Structure formats: structure tokens, C-alpha cells
Image (tube, rainbow, N blue to C red):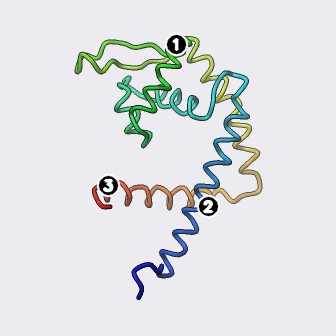
Amino acid sequence: MNDNAHDPGGAVLTALILETFRFNGALLQAGDRLVGDLGLTSARWQVLGAIALADPPEPVARLARGMGLARQGVQRIVNELAAESLVAFRPNPHHRRAQLVVLTAAGEAVYAAALARQAPWANALARGLPPGEIDAARALLQRLRARLEERREEP
């Protein structure tokens, strides 16, 4: 077999990857439209969500790792959110320089407003799709992500 040719599994996986890229683009655009008037983008909303769900609060590097994103990109967004008083920094008892990031009252309000829009949006998008199929897609993506994370050191 030619090393550049896909076997059947590799061909189907490649098609899934390409569709995932297209889906991600459409999802980001939809998220931007959903929360744009709240002063958020999909990226800012994602970071706010990571901060909101962190228990206990985390420093930027750990937030970024949990989201699978580069620390520098998350740091830039956190700095923007801090400049708008949506997040604040707190001392980290485990690391003097890596401060913890927390939502402010304003950040909690914006995040709550975004979540209030997300549930009806998700319900409408899922309408007519079998929940079991949606969960199977989620489970498959989770398994593929785990495989990628196991192989981080490979080219």
C-alpha cells in the first residue's frame, strides 16, 4: 500500500476531520451572532465559561490546557476581559506569579446572559435529531481527542 493512501478507516476519519473543521467554523459564527450584543465573541465566551466552571479558580496556563488552547491566546483574551472588568486576578497560594482568574459580578452577569441564550438555541438545533446519535457523536469525538492527546509527542 502507498504510504500516502488512506485505508478505509483513515479515509472516513479524514472526511470526519474536514467536516469537523467546517462545523467548528459554523459553530463559531453562530456563537458570535448569539452573544455579540453582549460584547462577547465565541472565543471570549469559551474563556468565560472555562473560568466560570473552574472550581477552584485556576491560572491562565491551566485554563488554556483544559481548553486545549495555547496559553498566549487565552492570556490575551483574559487580559481583554480584565480590562472590561469581567474577570479579576487573585493571588495564587501555590505560585506567586501565576495568578488565579475569577469572574467579577459583571462577568457572572454576562456569562449568565449568554447561558440563557444558549439553552434555547441548543434545543432548537437538536430538535428532530435522536439524542442517542448526538451522544454517540460526542463519545466518538471524545475518544478521538483522547487518542490525539496520547500521541502528542508524535509528529
Q: How crowded is mark 1: few (under 14 residues within 10 Å), some or many (20 or more)?
A: few
The residue carrying mark 1 is 83
Whole-percent x, y for residue 62 in the image: 35, 32
Which residue is farthest bottom? 1
Q: In the drawing, does residue 113 fall left or right of residue 45?
A: right
Residue at (28, 56) in percent of width and height: 153
Residue 85 at x, y = what percent? Answer: 53, 11
Residue in the image at 58% along x and 55% along y: 21
Q: Are marks 1 and 3 in contact (CB under 8 Å)?
A: no
**Percent position of residue 13, x then y:** 51, 69
Residue at the spot 53% in from the left edge and 19% down from the top edge:
81
- Residue 95 on image: x %, y %: 23, 20
Compute the Cα span from label 2 to label 1.
36 Å
Which quadrant holds residue 66?
Answer: top left
For marks 2 and 3, give the CA distance.
Answer: 22 Å
Please tell me how crowded label 3 is: few (under 14), some (14-19), or many (20+) other residues with Cα within 10 Å.
Answer: few
Up the image or down, 7 lies above or below 119; here it is below
Badge 2 vs badge 3, beta-carbon distance below 8 Å: no
Residue at the (24%, 16%) spot, across then down: 96
Residue identified by numbered label 2: 19
Identify the residue position indicated by label 3 in the image: 152
Helix, strand or loop under label 2:
helix
Q: What is the quadrant of the N terminus in the image?
A: bottom left
Q: Name which residue type carries label 1.
A: Ala
Q: In which quarter of the image is residue 59?
A: top left
Disc 1 element: helix
Label 2 neighbour load within 10 Å: few <14, some 14-19, many 20+ = few
- The amino acid sitting under disc 2 is Glu
How many numbered marks have been drawn onto this rendered protein structure? 3
Which quarter of the figure is the C terminus placed in? bottom left
Please indicate whether residue 127 sits to the left or right of residue 9 in the image: right
What amino acid does circle 3 point to?
Answer: Arg
